[in-house]
Image (tube, rainbow, N blue to C red):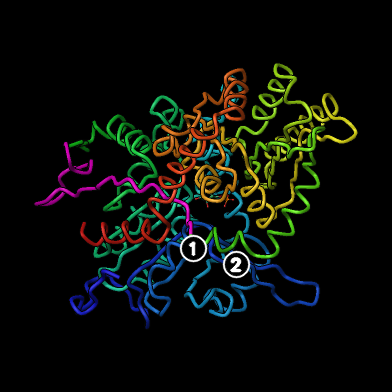
Amino acid sequence: MASDQSEQSEQSEGSTAHANPAWVLVASNRGPVSYTLRADGELEARRGGGGLVSGLSAIDSDADAVWVCAALGDGDREAVRRTEGRLDPADTGGRRVRMLGIDPGVYADAYNGVANSTLWFVHHLLYQTPLEPSFGPEFRAQWASYETYNRAFAEALADEAADGAAVLVQDYHLALVPGMLRELRPDLRIGHFSHTPWAPYAYFRMLPDDIAEQLLRGMLGADRLGFLTHRWAGAFQTCAASVLGRYDFVSYRPEGEEPHILHPRTGPNRMRTTLGVHGLGADAGFLRERAHRPDVAERMVTLREQIGRAPDGTERKTIVRVDRTELSKNIVRGLFSYRLLLAEHPEWRGRVVHVAFAYPSRQDLAVYRDYTAEVQRVAEEVNAEFGTDDWTPVVLHVRDDFARSLAAYRLADVALVNPIRDGMNLVAKEIPVLSERGAALVLSREAGAYEELGEDALVVNPYDINATAAALHEALTLPEGDRLERAKRLSAAATALPPQRWFLDQLEALQRA
Ligand code: F6P
């Protein structure tokens, strides 16, 4: 770890009084563990995965790093109550985790109202604009909660951080934290990473002007802003220049250097926020090991039975997709495209199966519940239209099962990743690593992964059902040599920046800032 503690001697004004200050801090809404309260009153801890969890494992698990997160539900809030927010390391894999017990009403407004129903929609272009968004008093009340929730994080981080420590704040939930933390602790090195796309300016400006400005200023409290692709970093820079340019924020895109934004002169030196791109990749070592455990082998047997064999006894081809049932994932248009493939190419009937896993997400929001129902309805429609006694065209599973996802990855002939818009999309990177059949990748040009995988994928406009159906046909019929060569290159590109390197690169860049 690059932080040199010996050089950080005396504590500067405003720095922490904490007994065991941290040198590296991560802040995210969802933490690495969540709790459920069992009927017998015991708490059951469930550890999560994902890029951030494996990224953080790159630094020693001893005491000088802390992860600050929010209590998401009743189980978490009970854990906070029992531990005063400092979770039992036995539940966290030895990590120091500080969980914030934010008032449930404030949390619901901040998470469901602002983060998921506003910022997520803006960055993923999800509004049906004749009717929404509509920013009135209800939104203003939610925004006040969002500020309170961000302030709770900023204060906890200020409390935990050693003098000059590096703080890595994650995502749109916490866009105001860098600015708030900068005021509390000017000594810190503050980074913020966006795991989502960034909205184009024309869409971003739907936000009320003062809110748009507050968001950008909040983020620009950071020394460094990280994005998954150059496209999202560029979109942020355009928004910042357009909204804040009149206040003398100046944007630079120098050749050969990272782009940056200079802030209005408030002292002898202008503050500078650098924009960096870190394209999170798949964790090949973890995936390969995990995908060869017995529970995955079991799921492969079951899946093979569900997929079945073609009338001539050969194995049916598979078109695999695995998503959270998230509005931006475009699962319904994926099903429409598959239906069109079967309609236009009858030769595929009985010879291909669409394996679609659509796992629950954000079920507190009605629009997500409706979308899940629509996915199920369309899948049933396709099965009713084309299915036969021994062929189910769409094998849809909606209950989360990681082992089954890995089994599907291994069995994939074609991976379908067609989001309307996506920060990266790790499924596009994971399937090439695990597919045993050298899967062809049908990939939306609006996924962040397109920047790295576009050359070897079959690229689609996610709104174009005809083009997606044609791409599925092409993917199913690619000559074997071409497909295997592409698969090899896709797998190499997908693993170019594994989570640990991704995390360390950001930390080192921040410490250089
Ligand atoms: O996948 C993008 C992302 O922003 C992740 O960084 C983040 O963990 C997730 O979405 C948030 O999802 P949820 O609302 O389920 O926590």
Residue matched to label 1 = 53
Question: CB of mark 1 within 8 Å of CB of mark 2?
Answer: yes
Amino acid type shown at disc 2: Arg
Residue count near mark 2 (Cα–Cα under 10 Å), binned few <14, some 14–19, many ≥20: some
Q: Is residue 181 above or below residue 243?
A: below
Marking on residue 47: 2
Percent x, y for residue 260? Answer: 22, 42
Indicate the quadrant containing the N terminus: top left, top right, bottom left or bottom right.
bottom left
Q: Is residue 300 above or below residue 446?
A: below
Left or right: residue 140 versus residue 301 is left
> Who comes first in sequence, dot 1 or dot 2?
2
Q: Secondary structure at mark 2?
A: strand
Q: Nearer the viewer, residue 244 or 188?
A: 188
**Magenta run includes residue 264:** yes
Marking on residue 139: none
Left or right: residue 9 versus residue 396 is left
What residue is drawn where x is 70% and y is 16%? Answer: 344
Left or right: residue 484 versus residue 186 is right
What residue is drawn where x is 83% and y is 24%? Answer: 385
Residue count near mark 1 (Cα–Cα under 10 Å), binned few <14, some 14–19, many ≥20: some
Query: Range of the magenta residues?
Result: 255-284
Of all residues, the one furthest to the bottom in this rendering is 19
Of all residues, the one furthest to the right in this rendering is 389
> Quadrant location of residue 169?
bottom left
Of all residues, the one furthest to the left in this rendering is 268
> Quadrant location of residue 412?
top right
Q: Secondary structure at mark 1?
A: helix
Q: Nearer the viewer, residue 425 or 287?
A: 287
**Magenta run includes residue 153:** no
What residue is drawn where x is 58% and y is 55%? Answer: 107
Please name the predominant secondary structure of the magenta segment in the image: loop
Indicate the quadrant containing the C terminus: top left, top right, bottom left or bottom right.
bottom left
